[in-house]
Image (tube, rainbow, N blue to C red):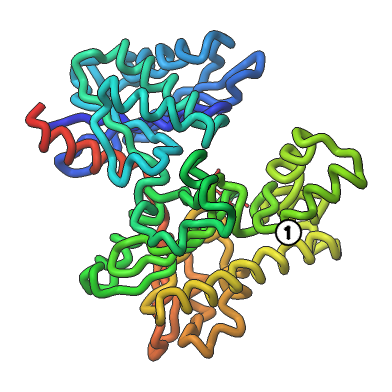
Amino acid sequence: MPIILTINAGSSSVKFQCFEMTDEVCLAKGQVDRLGSPSPNLFYKRHDSVTHQTNVPPVEYETVFHSIFEILLNIEKGILQNLNDIAAVGHRVVHGGSRFAESALITPKVETAIDQCIPLAPLHNPYNLGGIHACRQALPNATHVAVFDTAFHQTMPDYAYMYALPYSLYEQHGIRRYGFHGTSHRYVSMRAAEILGHPLTSLKLITCHLGNGCSLTAVNQGRSVDTSMGLTPLEGLMMGTRSGDIDPAIIFHLMEEGQMPAAAINQMLNRESGLLGISGIASDVRDLFRAVSEGNPMAALALKMFSYRVRQYIGKYAAVLGGLDALIFTAGIGENAPSIRATICEKLGFLGIHLDEEKNRSDEMEKVIHQADAPVKLLVIPTNEELMIARDTLRLIEGSGT
Ligand code: ADP
């Protein structure tokens, strides 16, 4: 009964789940959030709905993991008798550069490679590494595996991942499209094939991961062939607080005419733009729906722009794929906002996309929402990146004979 712990260590939160992998059952999950604030919180939930919530001292980053192990070992609320019950730990790592096209057993060499990718993801990889160090120290007997957000997109052809910049930038600085949310795009692609009852290798799919961060991927025969995020997760769709695609000359205009320093523009593009920037109210679509119902025109504009841009990318990727068998919606907005799904699908009838309004509004979490005779299947699939991390981890420990 191998128990696998998954760790998603970010700058402001550390999320964890424990799986029993014979049956892929989640035994417990939780997160420590508000890291860096004076009072970080630990939330924990066991499979039988026993919960626990507590303040964690604002200690050094790596010490947070002790609180996680403490609750997992807690006599009343925990799930483990001994930390050695954890056979392996799967770590989410945001950036694997061009080095990793698949998940990897963590060795000193792999750690160095993750470290070398820090310039490509300075806000993520250092924390991912912090999690790896802390867990390796606490669980020296377990196998540790890195699962990269970028890995799934390593199958993109060069003409899709190259920017039309001097080639030397790619050679010397690795400037290219990498793409993100790969674990989610991979999971929903596989699940879609199961639901549709066709081999993944026979399908042309567009997967729409619409959460706080948003990205679309064109998946041909199970392989990512293009994706909307780029060198960083800033490119592509309009997001909660990120601008997505803009004319890069806007940046020079702001520097020269607006006297804005680069750091302020970076902050603006990543944290003050997107749904928040246009509406001036919030990055969360639930708040924007409320504002629209109260007659707020800026919230309405923000939501229109959001759906319009997703629709644009669907057209683009249908052309990339040369056809389309299924369109999949996932993540916070994709799973929970039927009105946004409906607006996105408007005008896409020419591609064979015909949404069934009643199915679209049904309460089921995983559902098929196309009209019975529609050529393109429309699916809503809750993403499960943690399960995907646990599966990869299991596959690697079985393969390594540990
Ligand atoms: P993250 O990218 O941080 O993992 P999520 O995938 O959880 O984010 O998506 C968060 C977003 O999903 C929220 O900002 C909100 O816009 C949207 N969302 C979450 N729940 C709902 C809901 N019930 N109805 C509509 N939108 C929702």
Residue 175 location in percent, x, y?
A: 52, 46
Helix, strand or loop at mark 1? loop
Q: Image quadrant for the N terminus? A: top left
Q: Is residue 278 above or below residue 37?
A: below
Residue 31 visible? The answer is no
- Write down the quadrant of residue 190 in the picture: bottom left
Please rate how many residues cluster around mark 1, counting C-alpha atoms within 10 Å: few if below 14, some from 14 to 19, many from 20: few
Instruction: Give, as a three-letter code, the residue at label 1.
Output: Asp
Residue at screen point 71% across, 53% down: 274
Asked if one can make out residue 138 in the rendered structure from this viewpoint, the answer is yes
Query: Taking 286 as reference, is 23 left or right?
Result: left
- Quadrant location of residue 100? top left
Q: Is residue 119 above or below residue 395?
A: above
**Considering depth in this image, is 230 or 184 the residue closer to the camera?**
230
Whether the residue carrying mark 1 lies under 8 Å from ligand 1 is answered with no
Q: Is 216 left, or right, of 253 in this rendering?
A: left
Left or right of residue 355: residue 134 = left
| Residue ranking furthest to the left | 401
Quadrant occupied by the C terminus: top left
Q: Residue at x 75, y 61 (%)?
A: 302
* Residue that appears at 54% across and 77% down: 315
Q: Position of residue 153 (x, y in %)?
A: 39, 53
Q: Residue at x 65, y 18 (%)?
A: 37
The residue wearing badge 1 is 247
Residue 305 coordinates in the image, percent (x, y): 72, 66
Image location of residue 181, percent across then percent down: 45, 49
- Foreground residue, 218 or 298? 218
